[in-house]
Image: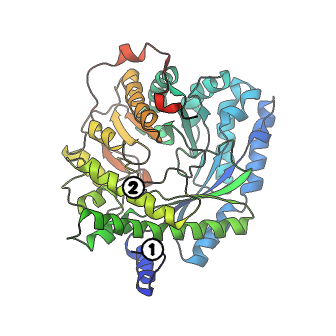
Amino acid sequence: MDPAKLTSNEVFDTLQMFEEHHLDIRTITLGVNLLDCASPSVRETCERVVRKLLRVGRNLVPTVNEVARDLGIPIINKRISCTPISLVGASAGPSCFVPLAMAMDKAAAELGVDFIAGFSAPVHRGLTPADRALLDSLPEALNRTERVCSSISLASTRAGINMDAVAHMGQRILDIANVHPEREGLACCRLVVFCNQPEDNPFVAGAMHGPGEADVVIHVGVSGPGVVKAALSKAPQATLNELADIIKLASFKITRLGEMAGREAARRLGYPMGIVDLSLAPTPARGDSVGEILQVMGLEHCGVHGSTAALAMLNDAVKKGGAMASSQVGGLSGAFIPLSEDAAMADAAGVGALSLDKLEAMTCVCSVGLDMVAVPGDTPAETLAAIIADEMAIGMINGKTTAVRIIPVPGKKAGELVNFGGLLGAGPIIPVNRFSSAGFIRRGGNIPAPLQSLRN
């Protein structure tokens, strides 16, 4: 197949993607540098942050809505990503971070964006006083805001794993969930920890505007698992290499649409175009599922033997097809497997086909990692930290981005259900290993970078 030669029938197929197969542009994200807002005064820093966000973002939502209407392409979310706030607030002192989170939330509400990300800290090599203060502020900051998202960089292939920070985050995640136990860990849905965190990711909760980015930039995150599923469903007798070609062509079409929408939004806003993240991002809607793609490939449930191989093929084909469609592919770009946000994956976990251990194995070959995984509320902090450490090790050794978004649900046990609502979905509480990792976690220190980090 030559993706450059699209026939009129294929154009019609693209229109069907919107109408029947849940195709959308998942997000257009405005990246904003806030380093010029830093001040020794907490009040002045907050005011500068709000002023800049309102100034550069005032036309984001109306412009994106106009682009969606004019092009006939659904654009679901409008988001903002910011410079890591631990850098912005460092000179204002440790008391600034909750006020800064609330200032970001205020600006996001006024602008009408769905989420604002970047309440973040890069701590993969060590914690500054500002980093530690931001981590300690997370329980209050995330529970007093509605739109603020946080991401913490704990590890990288070049730096190794900061195990002191990993242990710290295990406790902070529990603390966040228990501020308002009646919310069933909902605030934890806006926190993710990373190994090899990208600076240009448009997807929350991990979006961040890295120091290497332009002052203001437009990034695009596409979606489309329903499109890929529909395309594969039309080829029930295809071999696996033929399925890979079908996925590549579908990914090419999806990515071209995303780039077209992003470039038009950037042109109208007067900002440079950044990257297209071509990830397959599922939703709880039936038919819009990565798990269902694996079922169409021939697996009874996501999580059975063969799931890792099928997911590896899917992820690779998505990247190949998307890379042909855009010269500025970035972010995470691949297949997401967020447990509660994918109805078929939640079903698989509910019937016992998909365990936490199998999910971890599958993260070796897909984008991101353990995402939107609900665990019992009495899970020890050291166990949460150990789960994080395992996922950081996968990313570090393999030179890929991995992440953990885990949600302890106060008062609930393994096998019970939790419903986070909206795009966050619903699913079962997953059991964790009942044996202790505490002795390992309490050793502290760093896990050194692997030999493959010495590339110069």
Q: Is residue 355 above or below residue 250?
A: above
Type of amino acid at the residue the image marks with label 2: Asp
**In screen coordinates, is 261 left or right of 359?**
right
Q: How many marks?
A: 2
The colour scheme is: rainbow
Mark 1 near mark 2, Cβ–Cβ under 8 Å?
A: no
Q: Position of residue 132 (x, y in %)?
A: 61, 23
Q: Position of residue 398 (x, y in %)?
A: 42, 38
Image quadrant in which the C terminus is located: top right
Q: Which mark is residue 138?
A: none
**Badge 2: how crowded within 10 Å, few (<14), some, or many (20+)?**
some
Residue 439 versus residue 76: which sits nearer the camera?
439
Residue at 31% x, 40% y: name it.
361
**In screen coordinates, is 54 left or right of 376?**
right
Q: Position of residue 333 (x, y in %)?
A: 48, 54
Quadrant of res 88? top right
**Badge 1: how crowded within 10 Å, few (<14), some, or many (20+)?**
some
Q: Earlier in the sequence, mark 1 or mark 2?
A: 1
Residue at 70% x, 33% y: name it.
87
Quadrant of res 298? bottom left
Q: Position of residue 17 (x, y in %)?
A: 41, 74
Residue at 25% x, 45% y: name it.
349
Residue 126 versus residue 98: which sits nearer the camera?
126
- Is residue 336 visible in the rendered image? The answer is yes
Type of amino acid at the residue the image marks with label 1: Pro
Q: Is residue 23 above or below residue 435?
A: below
Residue beneath disc 1: 3
Q: Is residue 118 above or below residue 411?
A: below
Residue beneath disc 2: 316
Quadrant of res 261? bottom right
**In screen coordinates, is 124 left or right of 430?**
right
What is the CA distance from the residue labelled 1 to the residue labelled 2?
Answer: 16 Å
